Image (tube, coloured by chain):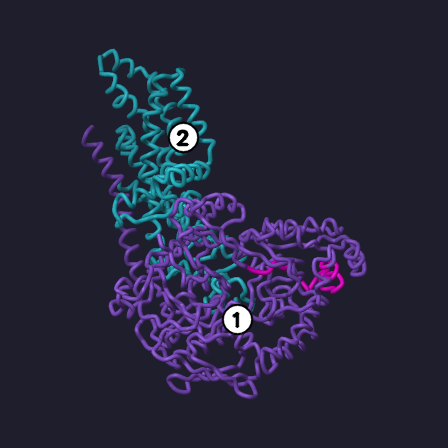
């Protein structure tokens, strides 16, 4: 297992290298640079050129890459051109809202998806099944921003139950923290649940027809235990994969949702940094996001083993 | 089974918690660094202890754009000026008619030959860090502004500020400059803020390290991409004159101002309707109806700028004066303005180069008949004379500003009616500002220009601004204009400059635009001059 982990982590290196080169080229070839954004809307080309020189942006591109990558290898992701903090500080300060939102959204998605998926599978072909599948189809078709705007209008503006946008950190109190996150989490979670519901249903259906299920039932295992212990656990691997993927998507930036609800997370950090051409931050965040994806996949792999001992045995 | 479930839950939560924990910690130190610049902390009394009559409360302002910095010497950003003007003040300032009025200066005196201006400073003015403002701070600030700001470099080349004594600063100009005082009084982007000398000395090319000024509000905290928090400055020394434009008495009538960065315009409107924001500084034209139907909300109109078509005069069809005159002749300004600003009350037809509210100071009858001609026949004839033979021209604009984009679309339609083939290229703002510097990339730019205090500051007067105006006639006029002994004399040259404007046609002026600002009815006293003014604004909820 340890060897496996080391291998997986080593495999990261070429991935990160390629990502770093590609992202560096893409942003530096895109027109516009931090100097012109700092100087504002009516600055002249000469002023911009002068500041470019002072910021070292006039160096040849390979030299800029070398400077940056040597710093990165030393563990220094660089300084933001706009924020008075380093790139790693910026990532971590923007990670907290994103993580809170992702976890809450994932919890909501699972609370909706797993019971619905199981119900649909158990009552296959009935009206209940068709209703659930209908809703999940709807959920996959509706873009999350539409649901977000609808929720803002209904819950935020009409009923005024929850704030329409913004963010308060956990230090401001649990309820203060949560009340800003409920609407965005619901709008994300409801959409995510659609996919997970479908996955749960189909995966459960497959397992329910297995011979060992019949055997367990004829042995007299209680129905509840039968479903949750025998069926769900066996059906869980594909579901976990989907959960891992959706969670990866949530952590690495629910860009649109964060923008609509004004949540200062990773998604907004990327968008804002692209808009102001904050090169160092864009590069740092993309590297970070790559790591997170790989990391989540790794955790999902490890969890396979936890849930299904057969996977563990094979790896030994 | 039980054990493994716990292990699983723990594993997930440990990962999450460790990441979240790191996040929380760093976020906190980050905030603290931004929150309390050294030397600004404990010595300051809390605003709440201020005995003076104050209505108190707070203003939460939904603000579209986060400025790159609040240091106005570095950036020309208008967002930076609107926020920073509450913190920093200038020697002189402008009243609502753009007349120069004193602010940190008590008085000033111009020498006979017009080359030296002596400023006497007000006494007992303290920076937010408690330090008394002296002529040394003024000289350091103003010299940096002259050296690095666009306005300073353009209009004050070779000029120097010196501290004569603690309360006297002397500006020595290379040549008499009639527009000097008007430019020093400007309160929009790139305004000449006075800051402590120490901070000026420590500044790097990206700006000063701390925001310490003399204004009615002090800088408290900048949470990146979230908000800027200003608090009332208890020791503020207000002037005694009545408030007018940026001039006169400034009073902080709320304890806290929050500029909350809200890029999405539907979120701004929703936050206003639900009562979370007190002001939305610049809402989309489409949302007016929704806002006006709510009895708790009021909708205000604030002047923004001038919608102009910039010709590439270096290369291509519009290097030819006749071709530029053709476009000017063929344009129906009103229908472009309707497309850009949706309703009549949000724009003004104005043939003057300057804004409609500057009429009286900067206006001339010259060019009235050449503005908004809507004469396609004349246009086609002029295009023929210019030798246009059906080639495709490139119109470039940015969608980051809805008036520019919508105006450009309507303009392209009109070009079609004039028989001109065109292609509309739309970019995000940073891309646009880079591409527009390349004369091979465009023929016409559609831009909204911010208002300026005097005509020689207008962007199209500059040789180096995209469009590249290059006219010996203008050069002569500008020498005459700037070299006039005072502004009154200079104004007589304005007539001729406007005549030149309609003959040479560096840009086609479409008209003046307004933006929409919306607020709760409880917010009182908002005014605008080159951006929103927030002192003397109360919010009694």
Badge 2, how many Cα within 10 Å: few under 14, some, many 20+? many
**Mark whose residue sits in front, 2 or 1:** 1
* Residue A207 screen position, x and y as percent: 33, 20
For mark 1, what is the residue?
Answer: B150
Q: Magenta span has B324? A: yes
* Quadrant that contains the N terminus of chain B: top left
* Residue B439 screen position, x and y as percent: 64, 62
Could you say which is closer to the camera, residue B516 or residue A289?
B516
Res B511 quadrant in image: bottom right
Chain letter for purple, please.
B
For mark 2, what is the residue?
Answer: A195
* Residue B325 screen position, x and y as percent: 74, 62
Residue A273 seen in this snapshot: no
Residue B483 seen in this snapshot: yes
Marks 2/1 same chain: no
The furthest residue to the top: A218
Chain letter for cyan, please.
A
């Amino acid at each position: 297992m340890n060897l496996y982990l080391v291998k997986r982590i080593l495999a990261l290196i070429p991935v990160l290298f390629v990502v770093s080169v590609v992202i560096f080229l893409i942003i530096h070839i895109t027109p516009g640079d931090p100097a012109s954004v700092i100087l504002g809307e009516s600055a002249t080309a000469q002023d911009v050129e002068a500041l470019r020189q002072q910021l070292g942006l006039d160096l040849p591109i390979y030299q800029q890459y070398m400077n940056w990558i040597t710093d990165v290898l030393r563990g220094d992701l660089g300084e933001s051109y706009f924020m008075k903090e380093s790139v790693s500080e910026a990532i971590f300060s923007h990670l907290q809202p994103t993580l809170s939102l992702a976890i809450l959204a994932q919890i909501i998605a699972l609370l909706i998806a797993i019971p619905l998926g199981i119900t649909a599978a158990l009552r296959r072909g009935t009206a209940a099944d068709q209703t659930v599948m209908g809703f999940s189809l709807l959920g996959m078709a509706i873009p999350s921003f539409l649901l977000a705007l609808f929720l803002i209008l209904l819950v935020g503006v009409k009923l005024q139950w929850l704030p329409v946008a913004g963010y308060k950190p956990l230090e401001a109190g649990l309820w203060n923290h949560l009340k800003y996150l409920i609407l965005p989490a619901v709008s994300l979670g409801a959409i995510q649940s659609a996919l997970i519901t479908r996955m749960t249903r189909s995966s459960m259906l497959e397992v329910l027809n297995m011979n060992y299920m019949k055997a367990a039932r004829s042995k007299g295992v209680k129905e509840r235990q039968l479903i949750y212990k025998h069926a769900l656990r066996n059906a869980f691997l594909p579901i976990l994969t989907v959960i891992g993927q959706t969670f990866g998507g949530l952590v690495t930036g629910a860009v649109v949702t964060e923008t609509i609800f004004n949540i200062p997370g990773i998604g907004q950090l990327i968008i804002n940094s692209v808009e102001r051409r904050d090169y160092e931050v864009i590069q740092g965040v993309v590297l970070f996001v790559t790591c997170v994806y790989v990391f989540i996949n790794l955790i999902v792999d490890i969890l396979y083993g936890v849930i299904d001992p057969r996977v563990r045995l094979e790896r030994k | 089974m039980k054990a493994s479930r716990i292990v699983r839950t723990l594993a997930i939560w440990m990962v999450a918690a460790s990441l979240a924990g790191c996040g929380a910690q760093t976020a906190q130190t980050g905030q603290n660094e931004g929150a309390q610049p050294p030397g600004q902390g404990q010595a300051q009394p809390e605003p709440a202890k201020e005995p003076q009559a104050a209505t108190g409360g707070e203003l939460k302002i939904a603000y579209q754009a986060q400025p790159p910095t609040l240091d106005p010497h570095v950036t020309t950003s208008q967002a930076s000026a609107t926020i920073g003007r509450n913190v920093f003040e200038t020697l002189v300032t402008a009243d609502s008619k753009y007349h120069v009025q004193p602010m940190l200066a008590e008085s000033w005196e111009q020498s006979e030959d017009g080359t030296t201006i002596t400023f006497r400073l007000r006494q007992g003015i303290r920076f937010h860090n408690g330090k008394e403002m002296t002529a040394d701070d003024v000289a350091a600030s103003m010299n940096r502004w002259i050296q690095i700001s666009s306005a300073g470099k353009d209009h004050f080349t070779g000029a120097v500020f010196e501290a004569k004594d603690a309360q006297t600063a002397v500006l020595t100009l290379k040549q008499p400059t009639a527009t000097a005082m008007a430019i020093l009084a400007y309160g929009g982007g790139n305004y000449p803020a006075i800051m402590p000398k120490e901070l000026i000395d420590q500044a790097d090319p990206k700006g000063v390290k701390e925001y310490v000024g003399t204004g009615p509000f002090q800088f408290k905290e900048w949470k990146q991409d979230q908000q800027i928090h200003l608090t009332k400055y208890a020791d503020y020394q207000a002037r005694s004159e009545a408030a007018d434009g940026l001039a006169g008495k400034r009073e902080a009538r709320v304890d806290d101002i929050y500029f909350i960065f809200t890029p999405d315009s539907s979120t701004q409107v929703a936050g206003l309707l639900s009562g979370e924001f007190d002001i939305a500084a610049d809402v989309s034209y489409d949302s007016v109806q929704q806002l006006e139907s709510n009895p708790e909300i009021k909708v205000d109109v604030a002047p923004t700028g001038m919608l102009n078509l910039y010709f590439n005069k270096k290369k291509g069809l519009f290097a030819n004066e006749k071709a530029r005159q053709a476009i000017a002749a063929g344009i129906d300004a009103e229908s472009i303005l309707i497309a850009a600003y949706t309703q009549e009350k949000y724009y003004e037809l104005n043939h003057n180069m300057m804004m409609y509210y500057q009429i009286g100071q900067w206006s001339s009858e010259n060019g009235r008949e050449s503005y908004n001609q809507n004469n396609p026949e004349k246009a086609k004839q002029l295009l023929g004379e210019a030798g246009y033979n059906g080639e495709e021209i490139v119109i470039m604009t940015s969608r980051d500003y809805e008036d520019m984009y919508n105006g450009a679309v309507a303009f392209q339609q009109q070009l079609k009616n004039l028989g001109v083939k065109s292609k509309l290229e739309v970019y995000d703002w940073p891309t646009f500002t880079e591409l527009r510097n390349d004369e091979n990339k465009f023929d016409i730019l559609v831009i909204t220009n911010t208002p300026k205090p005097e005509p020689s500051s207008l962007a199209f007067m500059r040789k180096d601004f995209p469009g590249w105006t290059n006219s010996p006639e203008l050069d002569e006029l500008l020498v005459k204009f700037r070299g006039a002994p005072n502004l009154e004399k200079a104004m007589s040259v304005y007539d001729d400059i406007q005549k030149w404007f309609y003959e040479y046609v560096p840009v086609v002026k479409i008209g003046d635009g307004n933006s929409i600002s919306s607020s709760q009815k409880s917010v009182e006293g908002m005014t605008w001059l080159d951006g929103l003014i927030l002192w003397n604004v109360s919010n009694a909820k």
